[in-house]
Structures are given as C-alpha cells and as structure tokens.
Amino acid sequence: MAHKIMITKKMIVLTAVIGSLLIMASITANTIWESKQAAAATDEAVSAVSAFYLEAMADRRAKAITNLINDSFDEMEKAVTFIDGEQIGSQDELRNTIGKVESLLSLNRFALVDEDDIVYTRYTTYTGRSRHSFLSGEEKKSRTISTVSLYGSSKQLCLVIPTPDQFDIQDIVDLLAFDDQGRTHFALYSKSGANLSGTELGPVISDHNLLKAVRGIVSEDVLEEIQGNFSNEKEGNLSFVSGNTHETLYYVPIQGTGWEMAVLIHESVIQDRIQGISKKYLETSKSLIIFTLVSTLTLAIIILFQIRSLSKAKLLAEEENSRVFRNMANTDSLTGVRNKHAYSENEAVLNGRIQSGELQALGVVVCDINGLKHVNDTRGHAAGDQLIKDACAMICNYFKHGAVFRIGGDEFVVLLQGRGYETMRDVIAELNRQVEANIKKNSVVISVGYSVLNQGDQQLRDIFDRADRMMYERKKELKAMGASPSRI
Amino acid sequence: MPGIGKLTGLLISALIAAFIFAACSLASPASGSGDDVPSDNLGASAEAPAISTGSDESVRSAVDFEHELDAYVPLKDHYNFYFTYKTVHPWWDAVALGMEEAQRQFLDKGITITYEYMAPDVASAEDQKKKLLAAEQKDYDVIGVDVADERIISPLLDEMVDSGTKVMTFSSSDAAAGCKRIAYVGNTHNYRDGADLTEAICEKLGYKGKVAILVGSVGAPCHEDRARGARDTIAKYGDMEIVATEYDMDSVDIAYDLTLGILEKCPDLDGIICCNMSNPVGAARAITEKGSNAVIVGMDHDEEALRYLDDGVIYCLGVQDCYSIGFDTIQTAVKIADGNQAGELFPEKTDEITTIIFQKNAALMLELLYGEM
C-alpha cells in the first residue's frame, strides 16, 4: 500500500529556509568566482601589457642609442674630412684643430691615433695601448665600437672610424632619461652582466651586476638562459618576485656594442591603474554580494511569513471545515437536533463516566411520536416530516436545559443533567398535560417515558431501557385517552 | 733595595727599547731611492701603508677620487708638460685619469694645461733616456719622470737640471738619493710596502716556509725597494727561506712563465711575494693552473688580480692611490713651472698612501675601481 506523504507546515518552512540558503550560497559563490576570474584575467592582462610595453620601450631605446652612435660616427667622418683639409704642421696646430672639431661638431671628446698608438687629444698626447683595448688589435678599417672600463668605475664607449672618439656613456644615460621621463628603469650591461651605465634597475637589481643580482632569485635554468642571451647578444625578458616586489624586465642587444639594454617597469605602473579599475569592480562585486544577501534574506523572510500566514489560514479553514463536517455528521438534517450518531458518541462518553462513578446524576427521557406511520401513509411523507418537526419543536421547547437527540424516525431521546435533571419531572408533567390537551385538538401527541441513573447501572442503555418501557406504557395510556393515529 | 731594583729595571728596559729602535733604523736600505729613510723625507708627509680593517670606509679611502685644486694661483694661463713613465700599463692609465681631472679643473679656472704622457711598450731605461733627451730639446715647462732605472736616469736628470730644465719625478719611482730633480710625487714607502706584504705572508705561513720573490723591472727603484723590504723581512725569520728571485720586466706573461718555472723546481713552494702589478696576476694564473697552494701577496689594483683576491687565490694586495698621484703631479708641476721650489707650496716628496686589502675587501674594491660587484 503506497504511503501518502503529508506536507506539513514544518516541511514548508524548512524547504523555504534551505532553498533561500542555497540560493544565497549559489549567488555568493558565483559572484566570488567571477571576481576571482576577473582578477586573474586582470593579472594576465597586466603581464601581457607589461611585456609588450617593455619590449616596445627597450626596442625604442636600443634604436635611440644606435642612432646616437651612428650620428656620432657620421659627425666623426665629417671631422676627418675637415682635418684632411687643414694644413697641420705642429702638435699645437693639431691640438687646435681637434679643439675646433669638438666645438664645431659638439663632440664630447675627439682624438686621433697614429700608427704607434699614440693618442692625440685637444690637451694631451699619450700612449694609449693599455687604456684602449681597440688599439691592441689590428688596424681599424671600418667603424668600430669598444667599451672602455676606466679606473673608478667609469665606462666609456669608444667609436673608431678609425680615429677614436671617446663617447661618454653618461650622454646616453642622459638622453634616455630625458626620453623616458622617469616612467621606467633602464640600464646598460656588458655581456658579463656588469652595469655600464651606473643607473639603477629597480630596487632588487639596483646598480649591481644583473646576472649576479638575480642569482638565487630566478632558477638556474632561467639564469643560464639569460647568460646565454647576454653572451650571444639576444633579446629576452625576465620576471621575478623578490619579497613583495614583482618585477618584469626586458633586454635587447644594442647592435655592434656588445651591450644589452634592459628596461624594467614596475608592474605597479600599469597594475596600479588596472588594479584601480579592478578594485572598483571588486567593490561593486562586494556591494552586489551584500545587496543580494540582504535582498534574498528579506525575500526569504517575507516568503516565510507569507507561507506561515497561508498555512495558518489554511489550518483554520480546515479546522472550520472539520467542525462543520463533524456538526453535519452529528445533526439530524430534518429537525436540526443531534442525531443517532451524536447520541452514540455521547453514549460512549457517558458510559465511561458511569462506569468510573464520576457521573452522579443523569436523566434520560424517551419520546415517541404517535401516529407518524399513519400520517405518512395517509397524508404523505411531507405531512409526516412536518409532524416530526412539530414534535421535535415541542420537545425542544419543553426540555430547554437538555440535549435532544433524534435516534429514529419517530423516536427522540433527551439527556438531562444539572438544571435539566432537577426540573425533569416537572417538565415531563407539563409536557404530558400538553399532550393530553393535544389529543382533544388532534395535534401532536408524544408518548414520554423517563428514568434516572440508579446505583448499579453500568451503562446508559440500562437507564434508556427503563425509560423506553415507561414510554410504551404511556403510549398505551394515551391510546386509552383517545389518541388514535387517524385523529392526527 | 727594592726601590733601586725597580729603577734599574726601568733603565734596562729603556736601553733595550732604544737598542731595538736603532737596530730597526739600521735595517733600512743604504742604497736605492732611500725611501722610508727619515733624512730623505724632507718636507714629505710619509705615511706607513694602511692595513685595511675590513670596513667599507677603510677600503673606500684607499683610492681618493675627490680632489680639488688648492688655492695656489698659477702665473700663466697655459702650461705644457712632458711626462714619461716606465711602460705602457693600466697602472699608469689610472695615474693619467687623476692628471686629466686636474687638467680639467685648471681649465675651469681658465688655465690650459697640455701635456704628453709617454712610455715604451717594454720598460727600458735607455728608451727613457732617449725620450728625456728629445724632450729637453723642446720648450716644456716641466719634464716629469717615473724613473725606470735610477742608476742610468738620475745622472741625466742632474744634467738636465743643471742646464736649466725643470725636472720632477712622479708616480712609482723617484730618482736616486741626492738627485737634483725638484720634487717627487708618488709612493715614498716602497720598502715598507714590500716589508709589510712579506710580514703578512710570513704570518699566514706561521713564519715557516719556502717563498719566491717576483720583481718587476731590473733597476726600477720601486720594485727593487719592495724586493729589499721583502728580503730583509724574510731574513728576520729563521724558518723562512727564499728559493728564487725573478724579474718579469712588468709583463704578466713573463710572470706566469717564471712562476711555472719556480713551481717546477720547487713544487712545495709555500708562497710568492710579488713586487709590482704584473707579478701577482702571472703568479695567480700559474698556481691556479698547477693547483698549488702557494700563498700570493702582491701589489696594486689590476682587475684580474682583484678577482683572484676575491676568489682567495691571492692573499692580499697593496693598493696604491694612483688617481691622487696623477692629480698631485699636475698640481705640483704647475708650481714648479712657475719657478717654485719644494718647501711651503709643495713638499719635496709628496707621499701617497698604500692600503693593504684582503679577500673580504675585494668585492668592494672591484666595485669602486671597475664597477663590478
């Protein structure tokens, strides 16, 4: 047999609460997930933008240096042409000419070197083989670039065509710094990673040897790759985290110099801006979460109250229905008094009380309508029904303090307790007088018998039976008085 | 009496101290440039080599890049000098940088300094003599010499001074004692430098072992003085033995070959005392190649030598302040050109410092001099 599941109020409330919690959890988790996705996408975008930005910056600066060097070469070639046109006959004239070249072409320093590697500058003449590495090699036939380490950490870039010009790296640094306007860090490095420009590449690498500075920060594989790139004049990039600092740098070789130009940008430069947007987005997300939570909670509370109200109303309606149905089940539809079913219920209750000795006084009156069958047979059921109603009204009218039951077609029982019990005999006497009067008027005749609770009674039936016997005796008396069915 | 006994003890102690002091003085060289001899230090502010305490400050002070011209007002607006030094070598490039800084500062004051700064590829007193004779024929305000061989060059300098040429000595080597050159700017304590480096190696070896001495150019006063300082110091310790003394003529390659030869003859060599800039580089290359444990002490600031110091191959180096030597040389030359003599305006010997540095100082020194860390 299939069990029918009953939906209780508790189940509805529980379902509503769990449902609301699930919705809230779902919305919250979704919002958090979306926020994290957005943050991850932002980071990815920052890295991509940083790398792209750095690559572009590094390329641009490498080209700027190359252009600067090429310009200097061009100027030096003009200088050589100029010197060729001068009639130089003494060291003083040579120095003066070199001075003119420096002034005319705005060269930082300009020198000539003879076949004995004697260097001639505006103010000095010196043996330069140990000072300038390019002098120790073969005769220069084309443009040559050489880096010179000076005592005291200074570095120079010598341009040779074949006469060397000493080109101050500081000029390059100044040029790039002017171009950069403080947006990035940059530095020039030798193949060994030595800092040539003296500029700081961020707080971690600072002005140290780049390859040594990142040792221990990046993996050995990455370090080897960078060393290889520096040695082979290749470009590349490097990202590392040191403490709370996350930095990305890009390096490109500068053609013909053996240098690497490294550009570093704190991701914060871009990230700060993007994170500003991201932060705003996260704030919005937070607000959305709070708003959603509050809204859902409010909605859940409203739904709960509504469900509760509905449940209560439904419950009341059901109770009312139940009461109506119960009344209908216990009421005689014709007379409106309680019926046989109601009597049986009362009988069961009273039996219990009799047996327990709780009930001290009880009167039972049995009433029977005389001539009902004759009326039904002769005048129709409508007249019979009317007789029943009239008889019932008469009984109810006399027994105002008792419970009237119609237990059969023409039979009524009145149960009397309290005041009804006390006045029972008087009322019956009045009723009997009225009945006797009715015989003469051809009106309603009711035979009445009664009894009360006696010691030794075990159930209501015991009292009823005595009253019923008395009622039959009365019926006989009334018949004797002239009450015949044909007269009603 | 107890009081008399104590007084006698004090007197004896004083006598012993005086004797030791006198003995030390007598141990100073009787020949050569005579550096560290008080009578030769007239007007000089002679200082003993500084031993680095290991602090950054002591290392930074070994080379002074911060110089300003003194208040002297030159008489002319243009000076032309001639300088010649022993050999083409990075050590003198460092001197040149100090000279160029002084030249630049004079130029800022409206005074033009021009000069030649010349050396042969290989150290040669004869070549230096030729250069000086040629320069004497030209109208230089002052001729400066880093003496290649005092026995050959000192008489020539005297002749030049006698003929009216203004002559000074500079950088690593002065002329012989009594030379008429007007002044000297440079290291005045080469003997002490050699002695101090040797003391360091003796202490490191526990005052027992076999050592070799590498010297630079034959006759170069600074190298010879350092070698004498080394020999005299070794002589103090009975368990120390000098197994070889060789000259590399200021060539790293020769120093390397000489060291290999010494190690072949004496595989259990305990140490090498290097008296110039090329010696320690060549020696370090050789002992690294041979896997020898010989302790190396040497002179100067060659980049490769500093790296060997950083790696622990070289035990210590005596670093001279070349930059200051160059700067002071130009400043002194201007005063000499104006007819001044040693005295109030400049000392007869302008002393420059030497600082002995060890492995712990190498990285900082590399950074200071070569921008490498």
Image (cartoon, coloured by chain):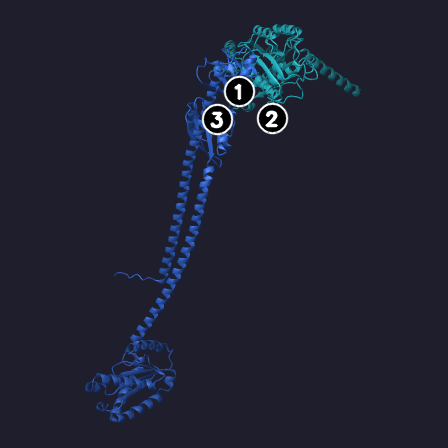
- Which secondary structure lies at badge 1? helix
Among numbered discs 1 and 3, the one appearing first in the sequence: 1
Residue A141 visible to the viewer? yes
Circle 2 crowding by C-alpha within 10 Å: few under 14, some 14–19, many from 20 = few
Colour-to-chain, blue: A
Q: Is residue B94 above or below residue A359?
A: above
Give residue A120's position: percent from left, percent from top.
Answer: 53, 14
Q: Are marks 2 and 1 on the same chain?
A: no
- Which secondary structure lies at badge 2? helix
Give residue B356's position: percent from left, percent from top.
Answer: 59, 19
Res. A188 mark: 3
- How far apart in space, not on screen, are marks 3 and 2 (Cα)? 28 Å
Circle 1 crowding by C-alpha within 10 Å: few under 14, some 14–19, many from 20 = some
Res. A102 mark: 1
- How far apart in space, not on screen, are marks 2 and 1 (Cα)? 39 Å
Q: Is residue A14 left or right of residue A157?
A: left
* Residue placed most toward the observer, B244 or B52: B52
Residue A208 visible to the viewer? no
User: Which dot, 2 or 1, sits closer to the camera?
Assistant: 1
**Quarter of the image with the N terminus of chain B in it:** top right
Give residue B104's position: percent from left, percent from top.
Answer: 59, 20
The amino acid type found where label 2 is placed reads Glu
User: Can you tell which quarter of the image residue A347 is in?
Assistant: bottom left
The amino acid type found where label 1 is placed reads Glu
Res. B156 mark: none
Residue under circle 2?
Answer: B57
Colour-to-chain, cyan: B
